Amino acid sequence: MKAIYIAGYFQSPFGKLMSMTQEQMLAAATAGVCAEARADPSAIDSASIASACSFSLHQQGLLSGLLAGVPGMEAKPIESVENACASGGQAILNCIVRLQAGMGETALAVGLEKMRDNLGKADGKRVGEALGYFSDPAERPGKTFVFPHIFAEIMQTYMQRWNVSERELASVAVTEYKNARQNPFAQMRETELSLDQTLTIAGANRYLVDGLPLKTYDSSQITDGYAALLLATEAGLERLGLRANDCVQIVGWGSAVDPLQKGRRNVLEPAAAYSAVQTAYTMAGVRAMEIQTAEVHDCFTVMAALSAEILGLVKPGFGAAYWAEGEAEVNGRCALNTSGGLIAKGHPVGATGIAMVGWSSWQLLGKVPAALQVRDARTAATFNIGGPVCASVATVLRRPA
């Protein structure tokens, strides 16, 4: 197969983009990543756009047409991608497939989500309804906020199955808020969080579903944001005037989907997730112990624990302990979510999977803030999910020689 490189990465700050429209977000993402690669949009051969809530929150489809309206992007193969919260990761994989198929030498993966209004306020009920469309219809009755309810059930199942405490899972949020303080792009960069705060039911922190353990600080953010990744083959890099030795390479990738139907999936050991990660590892020729840093899909703290297990860093049941014992910290065994993760960096759904790969590339290039830089990071992984542990996308990245 052709070697695939990251020629450029660009993202907005995550949080509130106020009156910025989707069309403006696409234009800014394209301009930003092209500036990073010292390229013009006309040098891009194709593109994939990821968004999960454009129809439900903005009554807007055909985002590919909006991107084609960016000067230099007209008359190209452009597709819109929806795979729930794994939409961004899927857009990257779709770009890779086109490059492998010989459909050009450069491809743009761009993801975005506008989840707040023009004043920066979030309508939690409306967003919750929109995200609820990505669940099994049979799971929705009786759930006002579908995904917090589903993951509260997963959290309870995980805690009971493995004898895990709320305190252990709360350590995920504490670690990620600490990282976000150093990330200038993070939504919660102004917020400090202690373990006691995550466990105390007061102020903003509350149990979200009666009788279930999930709390506010266990949850990801409602976020505006966009991210763009420019991928290239060696021929594409040559056209852009870039050297392969200066660019991060995506050396492995994998995707798989478990059934959406509740009765047909194993949320504690999801087959698709394990398959996607193992496929990426095998393609890259690496083992879990060779990964120094990873960005994982912590839509809720229980998913951060499960992700450590799915990546093969620990056996099933030990993911929460991995975080609680400090192994996920910047100087830990394998640093997880040094960006702050979805819980503290933010979760603009369509942009999330792209931001994972982009931040990981910055880690390998030594471009993240010093306090977040993993020492001598050579290999990174990402794990992006969509739905109730349903669609899974994984990548492995390697730094320049």
Image (tube, rainbow, N blue to C red):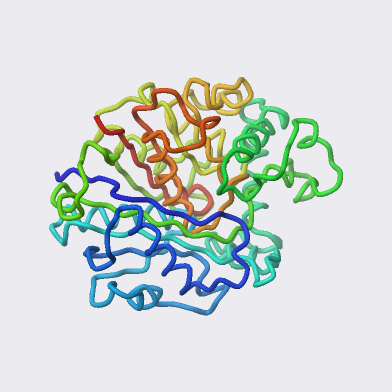
**Which residue is at 34% across, 27% downward?**
378
Nearest the camera: 395 or 136? 395
Nearest the camera: 56 or 261? 56
> How many callouts does the rendering have?
0
Judged left or right of residue 109, residue 352 is right
Residue 175 placement: quadrant: top right
| Residue 173 position within the rendered picture, expressed as x and y whole percent measured from the top left | 66, 37
Give the quarter of the figure containing the N terminus.
top left
Give the quarter of the figure containing the C terminus.
top left
Residue 248 placement: quadrant: top left
Judged left or right of residue 342, residue 60 is left
Q: Residue furthest right?
A: 202
Nearest the camera: 374 or 144? 374
Residue 274 placement: quadrant: top left
| Residue 197 position within the rendered picture, expressed as x and y whole percent measured from the top left | 79, 36
**Which residue is at 65% across, 72% downward?**
118
Judged left or right of residue 351, residue 177 is right
| Residue 81 position within the rendered picture, expressed as x and y whole percent measured from the top left | 38, 64
| Residue 227 position within the rendered picture, expressed as x and y whole percent measured from the top left | 44, 56
